[in-house]
Image (cartoon, rainbow, N blue to C red):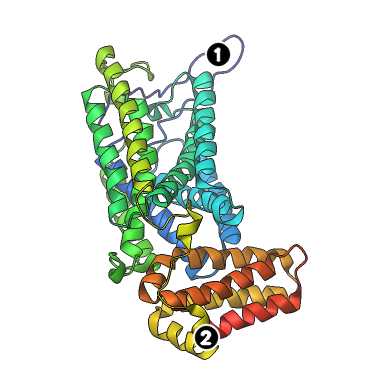
Amino acid sequence: MRPTILLCMTTTANTRGRSAPRLLLNKVPEVTLWFWVIKILCTTVGESFADYINMTLGVGLVPTAVIFTIAFVAVLGLQMRLRTYVPAAYWLTVVVVSVTGTLYTDILTDQVGVPLWISTTVFASMLAGVFGLWYARERTLSIHSIVTTPREAFYWLAVLVTFALGTATGDWTLELTGWGPGQSVLLPLGLIVLLIGLWRFGANPVLTFWLVYILTRPLGANIGDWLATPADEQGLGLGTFGTSVVFLLAILVAVAYLSITKADVIDGATRPEIPDHATPSGDLTRERASLVAIAGLAVGTGLLLTYANNQPHISALDEEATTPSCSGDPASLSATEAHDHVQAAFSGDDVDQFRTLAQDTLGMVETGQVAEAKSRVTDLESAWDDAQSRLVSKDCVTWAYVDGEVDSALTAVRAPHPDPSTESGTLTTLITTLR
C-alpha cells in the first residue's frame, strides 16, 4: 500500500495579494502495513486503558475524560509544532486521541443517557461536516497531502471524530447483536478485508482509507475486550491493565523500529509531482462499480445486524431482556446469605470494583457533593451493567438480589431532591453485601 503521492517541499507565491499557507514536509506516515498494525494497537489501548483508568482505578468517567482532553491538547500542540512527520510524536497523538474519543462516546452513553443509535448518527453527521469543510477549503481529503497547518488541523479533527464514531458504532453493534468478545471481532475484520479488496480492484482510495480507518476502531476495541475478558467467558483473561501494557509495549517497539528504519517516511524527493486529489491510473468504471459494491456492503451489514437483533439475546435495546429470569427467588435470600453467595460466586476483582465505587459515592453523599455523587453512581451503574452477563451465568439469584440493591442506590442518589439519610442507607446496605 504505497500509493504515489504529492509532497510539496517548497513555498508557493502569493495569490491575489494573500500569502499562501506555509508548506511543510508531509506530517503523516506512509500508509503501509505498519500503519494499520499500529493503528489497531492504538485503538485497543484506547478501549482497555480508558476502562482501566475509569473503572479499575476508580477515577470516574468525567474526570478521566478531562485528564485525557488536557493530554490530547498538549500532545496535539507538540505534533502541530513539528515541521515533518516524527513517528513518536505522531503515534503518541493517535494513542491519546483514541482514548479521548472513546471517553466522549462513553460520556454520552453512560453519563447523559444518549442512545447509541443517536450517538452514531450525530458523530457520522459531524464527520461528514468535517470532510465537507475540509474539501471545500483544500479540494482534497487525501492524507498524503498534509503539508499545511489547516490541513493538519482538519486531519486531527477528523481522526478524533472517527474514534468517537467507531466507538458508538461498535458499541451499538454489540448492543444489537449480543455477540461475545471473540465473535464480535469478525464483522469489522471481514468488512476491512472486503474494502481492501475493493481498493485493489479500483475503489476510490480516499473513501476506502477513511472507511477502513473508522472500522479499525471497533476491531481494535473488540480485540481488547476479548483479551481482557476472563477465560471462563471465552476471553484470554489478561484484564484491562494487562491488555494495555502488552499493546503499549508493542506500540513502543513498532515506533522505535520505524524511527530507526524510516520505513514509513514519505520521501518527496523521489516521488513524481501529481495533483494530490487525483487517482493515478484510475479507472472510472471500476471506481463506480466499487462504489456500488460498498453500498451493497452497507446494506448487507444492516440486514445482518437486523437479523442478529431479532435473535434471542441480552440487549440494551430490549428492556425486557435486560433483566434475566432466574429459577429462584432473590427475595428468599437473607442479607447474610446474599453476602456469602457474593463472596463465593463472584470474582474478587468485580466485587472490589463495585464496593470501591459504592464507597466513593457514599463519601461524596456524606460531604454534600451532590453532583459528584451522581456522577460516581453512574460509574457504578456502568461497571455493574458491563459485568451482568458473567455474573448472571455464575449465580443468577444472587445477581438479581444485588441488582435490586444497586437500583435502590441509583434511585436514591438520582432523586430530584435526594435525602442524604436514604442515600446513605441504600449505599451502606450495598457495601455491606459486597464487603
Q: Position of residue 380 (x, y in %)?
A: 55, 68
Location of residue 326 (image quadrant): bottom left
Instruction: Say what secondary structure mark 1 lies in.
Output: loop
Q: Tell which of 100 and 289 is nearer to you.
A: 289
Whether tag 1 and tag 2 are in contact, CB under 8 A, the answer is: no
Residue 411, can we see it? Answer: yes
Give the vertical position of 235 relative to 254 (above or below). Answer: below
Residue at numbered disc 2 = 435
Q: Tell which of 406 and 74 is nearer to you.
A: 406
- The residue shown at (44%, 60%) is 49
Q: Amino acid at mark 2?
A: Arg
Mark 1 Cα within 10 Å, few/some/many (few <14, many 20+)?
A: few
Q: Position of residue 31 (x, y in %)?
A: 30, 35
- The residue shown at (58%, 18%) is 19
Q: Position of residue 313 (x, y in %)?
A: 37, 56
Location of residue 430 (image quadrant): bottom right
**Left or right, 338 with reference to 362:** left
- The residue shown at (50%, 66%) is 383
Residue at numbered disc 1 = 14
**Left or right, 56 with reference to 29:** right
Q: Tell which of 327 and 109 is nearer to you.
A: 327
The span from disc 1 to disc 2 (Cα, nearest Å) is 71 Å
Give the vertical position of 169 relative to 148 (above or below). Answer: below
Residue 59, can we see it? Answer: no
Q: Position of residue 85 (x, y in %)?
A: 40, 38
Instruction: Say what secondary structure mark 2 lies in.
Output: loop
